[in-house]
Image (cartoon, grey):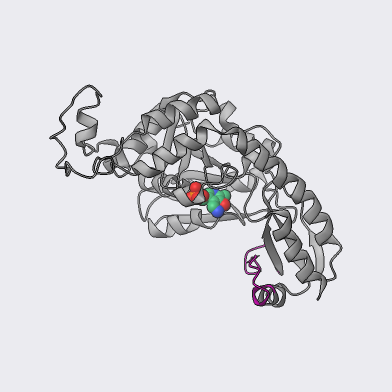
Amino acid sequence: MKKLEELVRPNIWSLSPYTSARDEYQGKDAKVFLDANENPYNDPVNRYPDPLQRELKQRISVIKGVPADSIFFGNGSDEAIDLMYRIFCRPGIDNAVAIEPTYGMYGVCADINDVEYRRVLMDENFQPDADKLLAAVDANTKLIFFCSPNNPSGNNIDRSVIDKVLDSFDGIVIVDEAYIDFAGVPSYLRQLESRPNLIVLQTFSKAWGMAGIRLGMAFAQPEIIGIMNKVKYPYNINMLTQQRAIEEVMQHDRVKNWVDSILKERTRLMDEFRKLNCTIKVYPSDANFFLARVKDATATYNYLVDCGIIVRNRSKIALCGNSLRVTIGTAPENNALLDALKKV
Ligand code: PMP
């Protein structure tokens, strides 16, 4: 890996970050807080939240087996994705490489930040080729994005490809593990210590069932986390989100039960989906959704909308012609989908 100083944009490297009142005084013993221009009434939401979410980080550190100083929380993992560009990529100069097709926000954030986004097409089984990815790299490539399990294809990306890129590329490699709890393979978190150029993204939006509170995680070496903390908005995770996440983390056994039910339903729904008249192919899934090629995706999508059932039409995405992406719901929700499709 190049030195971090060579990878980070010079203005970010030399940035003096904003210091908030809650950064300056961190003790809990004081009785009178007259430092942050808050309103003294309407306890507790009158107070600014902890800018570094220390209590939540301690708890997640135990669950994930990652030191607290290697954890960043964002307003969804989308915030962390955007920060990657803002920290590492000089607008109009640097570029990022990503597998294609994959999660759309990597490309959108590249566009927003005026960063060239190089899509490297996978094979028809949605597996990338390490040499093709590395061939797309030039001296101004700062980031390579993997998503595993991948959205929208649903499959785990071949680890030997990710490992080869991690070994060979001297910039930052991002492995987005939003769906890892459904994947049945180990997380890349275990490689954080040995791989200084690795950033792993996870989220509370999927297996944890908290998409509504907007909380995403990035894991990386403490020096990178320190730079993310410098660049983020001072109070990016609001108090209600922090509190709710702490409560949920204390009963995180529930997550395993949810995942077990979703995995059982995934097997059943995919088996049943294969038997439908409209289905051409159901792709294998390691996530809480699957991709299916059907005879006419737009007609099927519109028919389902008329039935009050919404799936995702991915037909315009590379390698996904006539394909629908179906999230695994509860058994009654999945039955409603199957019943509707059995009628066509
Ligand atoms: N990564 C992937 C692969 C996703 O599919 C999504 C959401 N669909 C996200 C990240 C964003 O998750 P969050 O809700 O944490 O912003």
In percent of width and height, residue 49 lies at 30, 38
In percent of width and height, residue 169 lies at 54, 37
In the figure, is residue 65 to the left or right of 57?
right
Is the residue 309 above or below the residue 91 in the image? below
Q: Nearer the viewer, residue 282 or 89?
A: 282
Residue 63 image-quadrant placement: top right
Asked if the stretch drawn in magenta spans residue 320, the answer is: yes
Is the residue 30 above or below the residue 132 in the image? above
Q: Nearer the viewer, residue 32 or 58?
A: 32
In percent of width and height, residue 339 lies at 79, 68
Q: Residue at x 72, y 74 (%)?
A: 300
Do we see residue 171 in this rendering? no
Q: Residue at x 34, y 33 (%)?
A: 52
In the figure, is residue 132 to the left or right of 62?
right
**Is the stretch drawn in magenta largely helix, strand or loop?**
loop
In the figure, is residue 252 to the left or right of 213?
right
In the figure, is residue 178 to the left or right of 282?
left
Residue 87 image-quadrant placement: top left
Q: Quadrant of the C terminus?
A: bottom right
Q: Nearer the viewer, residue 305 or 4?
A: 305
Give the farthest residue toward the front. 42
What span is in magenta?
A: 304-321
Asked if the stretch drawn in magenta spans residue 236, the answer is: no
In percent of width and height, residue 284 lies at 77, 51
